[in-house]
Amino acid sequence: MQSRENGFLLHLPLETKRNPGNPYTPLSNSLLNLTDFQYLLASNVCRKAKRELLAVLIVTSYAGHDALRSAHRQAIPQSKLEEMGLRRVFLLAALPSRELFISQDQLASEQKRFGDLLQGNFIEDYRNLSYKHVMGLKWVSEECKKQAKFIIKLDDDIIYDVFHLRRYLETLEVRQPGLATSSTLLSGYVLDAKPPIRLRANKWYVSKKEYPHALYPAYLSGWLYVTNVPTAERIVAEAERMPFFWIDDTWLTGVVRTRLGIPLERHNDWFSANAEFIDCCVRDLKKHNYECEYSMGPNGGDDRLLVEFLHNVEKCYFDECVKRPVGKSLKETCLAAAKSRPPKHGFAEIKALRLR
């Protein structure tokens, strides 16, 4: 793949050749400013759907996160998602030469077993996340347009209550049918007026040449958000007309969205920024059948937390859970283990801290 200047970023060169056995090709060989885009691996989960789908989950995943993808499948397998009118695919990119822990052959074997990988021929790198994000939206728009009503985009290290999401989408169809079928649906955690990071030493440093303004427009956290096919089509089409920007959620649900005049649906109350709160939710579900106050949050580096969470929260949708009593909120009762490591070699101190 030829590198070319796009106004913001020099694209990383391709290091992996396309698998000639892959029978699926995109309708176009372009993706944003890439002119020879191809799938290394592609899924047919929508083609296999025998009925209309409520939603397709597109999960941004680093190719080497095979254990994390396994946790997603253990938490809720594709067969159960199918019963709920859902499908799931994981969005990957080509392996960089520095990747020593997984090979393309292993990914091909994973695909043969599960059929849920979508891999583009651009290199895995955080500065290529916008390619991956657009690839997912574009794939659903092309492959699932006839079957799927909604799209749920999420990161692979996020805990999410899929039963809550299904109920939300079903309710949206009934109570706000105009929004549900519109080309202006973007729903999730809204981040308002955030400034670009201008510290050069920071991984997320953005130069004024890349983004000259003092603040980003409001955008949705890429942890998890909900959209639909008509909206995704508009975002992809507009992104292809604009200069590339590498911070995907800021660009697509902020800058591009603003150009299109799409409002954001705010559901910040769904989310916790503390993995410890999700951990405490699991604890209280097991002990007291307390409903969890949050439906989404980070896994805190614990791949098994999604499995524990979904396996325990499901019972709440069969009226087996109760509201948390007054004075028993997570902020009041959740204690987390704080580990401090001295600057040099030493011992770990573990103590209970109340989260705020």
Image: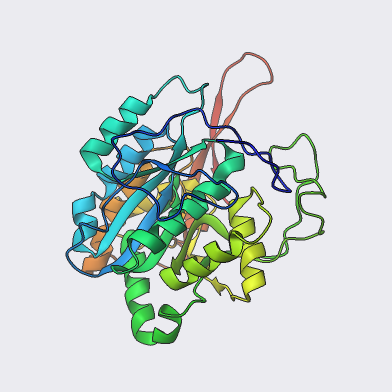
Q: Is residue 120 above or below residue 55?
A: above
At a point 35% along the width and 81% down the height, the residue shown is: 173
Q: Is residue 145 left or right of residue 262?
A: left
In the foreground, 55 or 138: 138
Residue 61 x %, y %: 44, 42
Residue 55 x %, y %: 33, 65
The N terminus is located in which quarter?
top right
Residue 202 x %, y %: 73, 37
At a point 75% along the width and 52% down the height, the residue shown is: 196
Count numbered badges in the picture.
Answer: 0
Kindly give the residue lying farthest to the top in the view shown: 345
Q: Is residue 146 left or right of residue 264?
A: left
Q: Is residue 142 visible?
A: yes
Q: Is residue 205 above or below residue 189?
A: above
**Colouring chosen for the image of the structure:** rainbow
At a point 24% along the width and 65% down the height, the residue shown is: 85
In the foreground, 73 or 355: 73
At a point 30% along the width and 32% down the height, the residue shown is: 108
Q: Is residue 80 left or right of residue 306?
A: left
Q: Is residue 290 visible?
A: no
Q: Is residue 279 above or below residue 47?
A: above
Please identify the quarter of the rendering in which residue 343 is found. top right
Residue 176 x %, y %: 42, 85
